[in-house]
Amino acid sequence: MLALERNCTIPLQNTQSKAIPRQSTTVLLLIITTEMTPRMILSAVLLAATATSCIAFVLPTGKTVQPPTKTTTKRESTTRLDAALLPSVVTHLSPPLRNTIILSTAASAVAISIYKNHKKKGLPDSAFSEPLPEGTLGCPILGNIDFYTNQGSVETGPGDFFRRQAAKVKNKNIFRYMAFGRPIVMLSGMKNVKQAFNLEFKKIRTTTTLKKFTELFGGESMLFVNEQDRHQYMRRLVGQAMTPEKINLAMPALVASASQQIDQLTMEEPVTMEKVLTNFTLDVAWRQILGLDLKDDEINEFYEAVDNWIGGIVDLRTLLMPNIKHTKAGKGSAYLVSKIERKMDQLERDGPDGSTMSAMYFARDEEDPSKRLSRDEVVSNALLLILAGSETAASTLTVTALAMGLHKDVLKKLKDEQLAMIAKRGTEEMTREMIEKDCPYLDAVIKETMRIKPLGTTGAMRVAEETIVVDGKQIPKGNAVVFNIYLTHEGDPAVKEDNNAHMDIVKGFKPERWLNDSTKPTEYMPFGFGPRYCLGANLAMAEMKVFLALLARRVDFNLVNMSPDNVTWKKASIIPKPADGAVVALASLS
Ligand code: HEM
C-alpha cells in the first residue's frame, strides 16, 4: 500500500479508435512520473489533447476515455485559438499538419527533459571510487519497460520483475534498474538493508511530489513526514495506541469482528476467503481503530467508502480532477473524515474508550506532556492506519487460508493447539497473553506465511540525498533506494534450498522451522526495517492470530479450485494473493 502511494505511476496509452483521423494516429505513450507535478501532467495532457483533438486514452482500469466528438464549428474555433499562439509560418499550415507539429514538439520536449534527467542521474559520483551496482537501466527515456508491463506472474505473483532482474546479476543483494524517471537501487539481505536504512532521515529520505495524494490520504500523517524529529514525535504519540497493553484492550473487539465473519460462513456454498478476510480487516478498522458503533445497514456504506477511497490510489481521474472532493475517492475520504471528526467530539464529551482513536486522541508526548496530536494529525493518522493495515493483513490471512488448505496437517495441528488452550484456559475470553504464550504453532504458521509471501512490491521509495556506499558499490546522490523483502527471505542461508524449494508454498511451507532455534530463519523482515518499521506490527499479529485461532476452532475446509499441483497467483497485488482469492468449501462448521 505504502509502495503504491509513494511510487504511484500511471501509464497512459493511446488507442486508435474509428473516430481518429489519420494524421493523429501517432502512438503517444505518456508516462507520468513522480518527477512531474500534477500541474505538469495536466498541462502535458491538455497540450497533447488539444493538438491531437482525437487521442483516446486507456486507463489502467481498462476503461477508455474518448475525447468529445467535434463538430466543424468547434474545430474552426479551436483552430483560431491554436493559430493565435503560433508563429505565422505555422498558421498557414493545414490544421491537421499544424496539430501534428504541436503534438510532436510537446512530446519531444517531455522526452528530452526526461532523457537529460536520466542521463545525469545514471552517472556515477566522480568523488567516489566504488563502482555502480550492476543492472541495466533499460530504454533511455522510459527505463525498464518490463517494470510497467510485466511486474508479476501467475506462477509466483507480484514482484517477478525484481526476481528476473536479480537473476541477471552476480550479486542479487544489490542491483539497479530504472523506473519513475530515476535509477533505483534495490537492496536485499539484512546486512545491506541495515546499512542503508539505518541512514533514514540522515542520508536517505522518502519523497512525495504528488500533492493530491497527500490531500486524499491525510497530509498530516507520519507517512508524509520527512523530517526526523517530527517523524519520531508522531510515532511516539500514535505508537501509544499500539502498545501491548492497548492491543490487549483491543482483544474483545478483534474477537467480535472475527466471530461475526465466521458466523456468516455457510456450509451450502463455497466461500471466497479473500472477501471474508477483507470484511474482517475493515470490521477491525471501524470497530477497533476508529471505535465506531455501526449498525448493520451502515456497515456496507463503510466498506464502500473505504473501497472508493483506496481506489483513488490507482485511478487517474482522481489526479486529473481539479477538485478532488468530487471524485469517488474524495467522497469516500470525506465520509471517513466526518466519522473521525464525530468520534473525536464524542471522545471529548464522554472521555476515553478502548479504541485506537481514543489512545491517539488522548496521547501526550512523554518528552513534553504539554504536546498532543492536533485534530488534523489525529484524522490523518487514523486514515493512515486504515490504509496501511487493511489490505496487508487481509491478503496475508488469505495466503494462510490457502496454505492450510494445501497442508491439512497444519490445520489439524492448529486445531489441536487451540483445543489444548481451551482445556487449560476455557473459552470465556481470549487475551493477548494467551495467544502470545500458549500458541507457538499459531505464531509459526503466520510467520511462515509472511516469510514465503511477503510484500510483493518494495517499501516506499527513498532517495539518496548524498552518495552512499553499500556492499562495496556506490549509490549516487539522486538515485532511489528500495528494499526487497522477498529476495531477502529467499537468500536466507538458514533455510535456503536448491531450486528455491524453500520459497514454494507447497514444498517449502514448514511452520515447524520456527519452533527450533537451529532451524529458525535468520534473514527476515516482513514488517520492514529501521525508523519506518511497521508501526502496526503488534496489532497486525494480534488480529491475524485471533482470526486464525477462531477459524481453526470452528471450521474445517477444503480448497475448491487449487491443489498442490495447481496453485496460481494474482499478478498484481500489494501482498501476493491466490488467483481465485482462496475459494473453500466448508467440511464442518460449529
Ligand atoms: C500483515 C500486515 C502488515 C504488513 C505485512 C505490514 C508491512 C509494513 C511494512 C513493510 C512497512 C514499512 C514500509 C517502508 O519502510 O517503506 C510498514 C509501515 C507501516 N505500517 Fe504496516 N504492515 C502490516 C499491517 C499494518 C497494520 C495493521 C497497521 C496499523 C493499523 C500498519 C501501520 C503501518 C504504518 C503506520 C507504517 C508507516 C510507519 C512509518 O512510516 O513510520 N501496518 N508496514
Image (cartoon, rainbow, N blue to C red):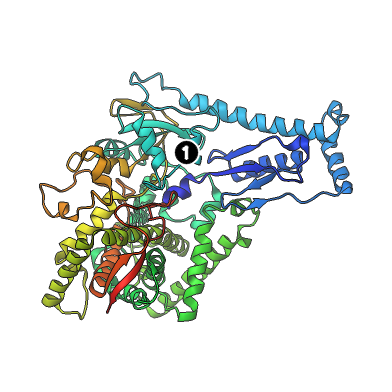
Residue 47 seen in this snapshot: yes
Quadrant showing the C terminus: bottom left
In the picture shown, does residue 412 fall above or below 187?
Answer: below
Closest to the observer: 544 or 236?
A: 544
Name the residue at 78% across, 40% down. Answer: 21
Q: Secondary structure at mark 1?
A: helix
When the figure is inspected, residue 452 is found, relative to residue 416, above or below; the finding is above
82 left or right, relative to 180: right
| Mark 1 residue crowding within 10 angstroms, few (<14) / some (14–19) / many (20+) | many
Of 525 and 171, nearer the camera is 171
Where does ligand 1 appear, by image quarter?
bottom left
Q: Is residue 19 left or right of residue 173?
A: right
Disc 1 target residue? 147
Q: Viewer-proximal residue, 497 or 319?
A: 497
Place of residue 232 in the rendered image (x, y in percent of width and height, measured from the top left)? 34, 51
**For the point 43% across and 49% down, which residue is it?**
571
Residue 393 position within the rendered picture, expressed as x and y whole percent measured from the top left? 35, 60
| Residue occupying the far front of the picture | 565
Tell me residue 473's x, y (percent): 32, 26
Above or below — where is 21 with respect to 128? below
The amino acid beneath tag 1 is: Phe
